[in-house]
Amino acid sequence: MADNSMAFLAYLDRMNAITVLLPLPMEHPEPHSFILQNNLGEEKLTILDRHSVEGYLKLVCGFSGDYLFGTDHWVLCSNGNRADVQIGEVIRTREFDETFYYDGDDLGASCKDRRTIFKLWAPTATMAKLKLYPPGAKYFELVKMARNEKGVWSVEMDKELELYRYTYMVSCNKEWSEAVDPYAVAVTANGALGVVAKLERTEIPRIQLPPFSHPADAIIYETHIRDFTIHPQSGTENKGLYIGAAEENTVGPDGKATGITHVKELGITHIEFLPFNDFAGVDETSANEEYNWGYNPLHFNAPEGSYSSDAADPYVRIRELKAMIETIHSLDLRVMMDVVYNHVYIREQSSFEKIVPGYFFRYDEAGLPSDGTGVGNDFATERLMARKFILDSVRFWVEEYNIDGLRVDLMGILDVQTVNEVRQVCNHIKPGMLIIGEGWELNTPLPQGQKATIRNQHQLPCIGHFNDRFRDSIKGSTFNLYERGYALGNGTYTEQAKEAIAGSIGFHFEQGLFSEPGQSVNYVESHDNHTLWDKLEACFEDVGELLKMKCHRLATSLVLLSQGIPFLHSGQEFFRTKGGEGNSYKSPDSVNRLDWERKASFPENVRYIKGIIEIRKAFSCFRMRTAGQIKADMRDMGLDYPLIGFSYENGKDEKMLLLVNPTAFIHHIELPRGEWAVLADDLQAGTAPLRVIPDGEKVVSEPVSLMVFLKK
């Protein structure tokens, strides 16, 4: 008779090794042998290693045959006790990855030609069932799925199940879990169920813009779909929705453009929306009661329903998102999607974890889930099927929704190979797509040389990185609210500012942050942290509005006239404020909304920033293609500290100058020989000359301002 006091645990930790854990202290003699059993036979285990660990005697036992995944196994010990074999660390081995890598392009639900096929990758499952709800019905039926090669489970139905709702039931380690299909392209309200979709029914006439020329030609404008139009004075009829973001010719209280028409008038090339894949944090059935930025991903391939006019209809959100994108394309603007492949909302509740427990996430040396993201889990992008999911997802969004670029959230969590393969996928489908990301160093158990970080930018030659050195040298530390940067009058940042303006490619320093200017995303403000205006309010608490506006204008203009990719936060052109809130990810509309009344209050600054954008777009010397060109055609004029002056050759026999005065004093500056037309001063900017400085006459540089000159 088995001795039940001798219960033990068994885990498959390698393709040919099982770990047996015997509880200590043992009241009876240690079993001298173990047998691995399944319904087809048995094999004696060989004890390869033994040692004590955390209250257990750990035995590593090897076997010679193949483990039959998809079948229940037991370990029987010589005293008659037995334990179910649990799937352990084996799923995080290279051998498992290679054995079960599936390269097919048919995962998910396919509905066409009078049949519907469901395919699910679940190699460690011993059973899988499809749970089907007919349209409008509360009842469901369970359909058994068949296991195929590479751990793919499938079932084929002999009719088109369009708009049937479905989930998968998966048995692994003797436990049943229910999960929405990770590859679902349509979902019910709040992502509760997947929906079988015929996406051809959601098609919108497409506008294919020509391939974009070069990353340095881009001017990115970041916004949030709800923030963009929810303000009472936005002039938008469908406020806070996809279709609202696409409304043209809307006007604010001053009769001037708001929304997408304003963005077009400003001269932007790319509008980047915070995540619009399905996310948690907002009840889609009462979307006006909650707010969230969208960094809580639930379903990566289905649009968010809170931006839809009807979250209950799976097709409406798809059609409206497509319509929004194509309307923006009709204005010759491009759409970038903020993608969040670094984590899921809650690991334990995610479809990935329910379907293949332990595979899709990273674990530390202690066997605990890693948390480099700070939200409880790190997606294991280096694993083959995790990487495949990301590549499949990116391909889907580009092909199905016609997006033009990606902003990769917490890109430093991803591995270099995955990010480069994303680049290759995009190049194949749509050359010229912009890909930028946050290349921060994060504490995740991936070798440093494999992380998609700024440190490894040389391995990511066609990927843009948010340049935190630019940000902090121009405006001051993001994490010390009261520290001032160069544009706020701190001359100690002069040398760093020169390097930043020159693209951070080693122009002024021996070692550049980037190899090429197209890798540097230059910014002083984004949805994260305090707005620049709110930082100025903190730094200049007892100073009048004029100085704050001048500092703000200078910093924003430097973003636009520096080598690299300029990035603006929506509303930055009219001094956006969040009332001092530094982390507004779930703050109300009153904090987050784009205040179109504020645009009406600061028309001069909007006009000025528009003029600076005109200058950047008109003169290629402000958007050079290569580090070599910058070093050859850009010269430091050697002005007195802390002034900065650069001269440029733009390849058209035209010479240009940029002068920067961050001080509170007027300076008289001698220009190089010749007549110089002023294109920008402290009050106006544009491609039309404001006045001409005669040869030999000094120019007056006003406090906290920049000037741009074109040689006559």
Image: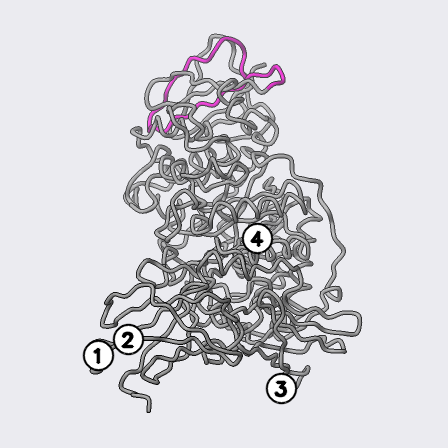
Mark 4 and mark 3 in contact? Answer it, CB < 8 Å.
Answer: no
Q: For the N terminus, which image quadrant?
A: bottom left
Q: Which region shows up in magenta?
A: 651-676
Mark 1 and mark 2 in contact? Answer it, CB < 8 Å.
Answer: yes
Earlier sequence position, callout 1 versus callout 3: 1
Task: Tell whether position 391 is magenta.
Answer: no
Relative to 654, does residue 96 appear above or below in the rendering? below
Q: Amino acid at mark 4?
A: Met
Residue wearing tag 4: 337
Q: Nearer the viewer, residue 704 or 154?
A: 154
As helix, strand or loop, the secondary structure at mark 1 comes to loop
Q: CA distance from mark 4 to mark 3?
A: 35 Å
User: Which quadrant of the figure has residue 29?
Assistant: bottom left
As helix, strand or loop, the secondary structure at mark 4 comes to strand
- Please state the horizontal and vertical placement of residue 63, each as a whole percent of the image: 43, 67
Earlier sequence position, callout 4 versus callout 2: 2
- Please state the horizontal and vertical placement of residue 111, each as a whole percent of the image: 73, 70
For marks 3 and 2, give the one nearer the viewer. Answer: 2
Q: How packed is label 3: few (under 14 Cα within 10 Å), some, or many (20 or more)?
A: some
As helix, strand or loop, the secondary structure at mark 2 comes to strand
Q: Amino acid at mark 1?
A: Met
Q: Amino acid at mark 2?
A: Leu
Residue wearing tag 3: 140
Query: Colour mode?
Result: one colour
Q: Nearer the viewer, residue 362 or 300?
A: 362
Q: CA distance from mark 4 to mark 2?
A: 51 Å
- Please state the horizontal and vertical placement of residue 353, each as a whole percent of the image: 47, 69
Earlier sequence position, callout 4 versus callout 3: 3
Q: How packed is label 1: few (under 14 Cα within 10 Å), some, or many (20 or more)?
A: few
Q: CA distance from mark 1 to mark 4?
A: 58 Å
Residue wearing tag 1: 26
